[in-house]
Image (cartoon, rainbow, N blue to C red):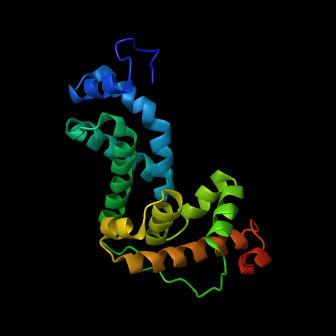
Amino acid sequence: MLFRKKKRYQSIEELVIGCQKSEASAQSMLYEMYKKRMMSICQRYARTSMEGDEIFQDAFVKVFKNIGELRNISAVDGWIKMIVVRTAIDYYKRTTKQQLLLAPVESIEVSLESEDYKRILSDIDMQKLLEIIRGLPNGYRTVINLHHIDGYTHEEIGEMLSISPGTSKSQTVRGRNLLLRKLEEQGIIEHDRLGRKS
């Protein structure tokens, strides 16, 4: 990947090495390069825009503090994303005092195959989906983001949230059902689609 703005950094490798040397110009360029994509992740995990901004700033402090430990420079994308996601999780562990995943959800019958669910999510306006996800209780919002959007396994989620993979699975199903119910309440999806099996 070439950079036109700063001839000094001709590749992502040179840019990361510049950050590892604490060069302000490299840090500024890396920050700007990842800002839009990583901010969108922060906003998905946050309840408000202000919280999303705070998570993003905290995450990039960690990025610059720990970038010297990054050995496989070609993996910088995944490394930064992991820091952002873990920072979001740490934020809610701190602010909710470990009470993740405890909000009650009324029982609702939903028979959706995973492909149906993915298709429904892909058909919805992203901004509207973000608003509804933000309205979910912290724990459900976290597992929906981790599993259905960011693609982490239940084993990985269990490790990140200090819960069992089985708890991750059950909370993901409950969170998914709550999300679908909210989509239905707002008229974004129809009731007959919720009950249809593929």
Report how many numbered discs are placed on residues in the image. 0
Q: Quadrant of residue 91?
A: bottom left
Residue 24 x, y percent position in the rendering: 28, 23
Residue at position x 34%, y 44% in the image: 79
Residue at position x 44%, y 36% in the image: 34
Residue sitting nearer the eye, 1 or 67: 1
Q: Is residue 68 visible?
A: yes
Residue at position x 72%, y 77% in the image: 194
Residue 190 x, y percent position in the rendering: 78, 72
Residue 82 x, y percent position in the rendering: 36, 50
Residue 88 x, y percent position in the rendering: 38, 56
Q: Quadrant of the C terminus?
A: bottom right
Q: Is residue 73 above or below residue 50?
A: above
Q: Quadrant of residue 185?
A: bottom right
Residue furthest to the bottom? 107
User: Left or right: 13 with respect to 33?
Assistant: left
Q: Quadrant of residue 154?
A: bottom left
Residue sitting nearer the eye, 178 or 116: 116
Q: Quadrant of the N terminus?
A: top left
Residue at position x 39%, y 54% in the image: 85
User: Left or right: 190 with respect to 24?
Assistant: right
Q: Is residue 46 visible?
A: no
Q: Is residue 9 above or below residue 108?
A: above
Q: Is residue 90 above or below residue 180?
A: above
User: Left or right: 165 with respect to 123?
Assistant: left
Residue furthest to the top? 7
Residue sitting nearer the eye, 116 or 134: 116
Q: Is residue 56 above or below residue 178?
A: above
